[in-house]
Image: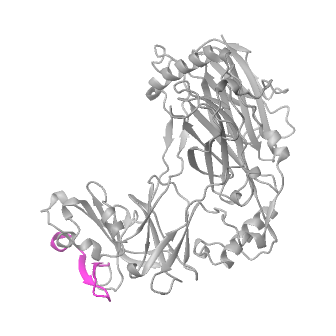
Amino acid sequence: MRRFKLNIAIICLLLFQIEIGFSQDGYVSDLNSESVSTESIYIHSNTSMLFAGEYLYYSLYCFNTETKNLSDLSKMAYVELISSSGVRVFRHKIRLERGRGYSDFFLPVEVETGNYKLIAYTNWMQNSDLNQFGISNINIINPYKAVKAQNQRNETVSKDSLLMTNVVLEKDSDNNLIQLEKPSYDTRERVKISINTSDLSKALKGTFSVSVKHKSRITSPQRTDLKDYYEKMEAKSIQLSELKQANHLPELRGELYEGEIKALNGGQVQDLNVAISFANDRSLFRIARTNRDGKFYFNLDEFYYTEDLFFQVIGEDLQDYKIELKSKLKPVINTLNFETFELKPEWEADIINQSVYNQIENAYFEFRSDSLYIPNKTDFLSEGMFEYYNLDDYNRFNTLKETIQEFVSKVSIGRDENQDRTFQIQGFDYDTSTGTKPLVLLDGIFVDDHEQLMDYNAKTIKDITVYRDQYVIGLSLFQGALVINSINGLDKNEFLQNGFFNQLKTIPPQLQKTYFSQKYDGSGNNNRMPDYRQQLLWLPSLEISEVEDQIIEFYTSDVKGLFEIRLEGFTDEGQPISFNKTFEVN
């Protein structure tokens, strides 16, 4: 554990040495080391064979390869589903807490039948080869589209010429960790799992994931369990000398965004303030300062929901600078080896049945939907006193300037040193003309050049809120804040064309969920509704903190056949756990 803490400290020291501006985030380091540990990810998916119209569920375990404990280094992971032809079906951002994260993906009808790779990695892991990535084989069957299979050389072949890897069906683990009351159940009957710790040398305290799913007779790729993965994990590190040239920095405090300021007229690029803002989200407003090379870095440690990020240089002539944003590089995947895939005639009945089940379940999705967990977000203005103006309560004027002058109290129009018009907000203990500009947000987007808003069409504005406190953000001081919300949302084209700010398209992190669990205990009116669930239970993040047995309950559906319980996890003492057990539904 001490070595792990040293590694984090050394990374912080290195980042300080190469002047990437993390010092304002409070990084402190004064230790020495020659290398930093790498990471590796294990993926626990609910299955390795899916149909279009089904959900792929996955849970991540990110490890420090030297300590073999769950990693507390990276706070963000990336998950992709890749086809044999190199098409990325999806790319998720997953927030990691103590090395753990999870999400899901609904397979659309556009996906092709074939073999896919589910890969997971951190930004830090991209400095290593693909062997450090979490990689799982996934077979997908799309009964709604003609088969267009490809071999490993991406040559189109007929389905009759394809071969399928022979896979031995997994037997139950030789233990009694997972105990059931009986080996078979009726449809819509309650099943109680008892996770017994009596056979383990240490108490089963830790973090786990549990899947209960119908075991199809269609052959699927064999999965590596967590125990095998853990035993084969190789301890690796990156030398300090190599780290200075690393293209991918560790995301220590959240998602990392990088950029660089270019001076078009040979001006100064060091110590410039750069702002990042999100449409309709004040809680994520940040200001960073450039290093001697004009580079800046932002750490986003909170959830966000918008795809648009906006960057601006503060307090400078915008036409003299250019903002270049570093794109999020995706790993090179041309070395991945894909298995071939064959649809066999004897699977026809199973494919038809499973397709019908999926269609029925999707038709009743609204009655079995999952619950999103929306984190509480508090912006830095929430504690301040404010005055609110709903413009529908007043006579409408043509411009924002006229609106401010006519009825918005404590706000006036002044001039800066360049004689450009600026808004000024009166403080509580001093006059309006303090020489300090207020913070101005239009639909959550920071506006440093107030001149751009003076003639803004006030008839498109919904409301205005005025805050009179002082605010320090990064190394910038603001006298008050003027928050403006439009009726239909900001039209960004005008500002983008004038070089007012730089816009970056991104994908937000996946939100956490509480997954639906059907009950037939008389608490709801579900008896007359069809139930063809094949995924009976999915618990992506089960925390066990008691020595006593853990009891988990769920209900079977109208689907009959063999079901598999699969438990993966990692104890607080560093012991990998991987068990499976089957039962029948008659």
Residue at the (80%, 54%) spot, across then down: 65
- Which stretch is magenta? 405-427
| 318 displayed left or right of 151 | left
Screen quadrant of the C terminus: top right
Looking at the image, which residue sits at the far right?
201
* Frontmost residue, 475 versus 449: 449
Residue at the (45%, 75%) spot, across then down: 322
When the figure is inspected, residue 455 is found, relative to residue 302, above or below; the finding is below
Looking at the image, which residue sits at the far left?
395
When the figure is inspected, residue 263 is found, relative to residue 299, above or below; the finding is below
Visible residue check, residue 344 = yes
Name the spot of residue 331 as percent of width and height, x first.
65, 54
When the figure is inspected, residue 94 is found, relative to residue 499, above or below; the finding is above
Name the spot of residue 205 as percent of width and height, x first.
75, 42
The image quadrant of residue 412 is bottom left
| 325 displayed left or right of 223 | left
Visible residue check, residue 521 = no
Is 551 one of the magenta-colored residues? no
Looking at the image, which residue sits at the far bottom?
417
Residue at the (67%, 73%) spot, across then down: 15
* Frontmost residue, 378 versus 558: 558
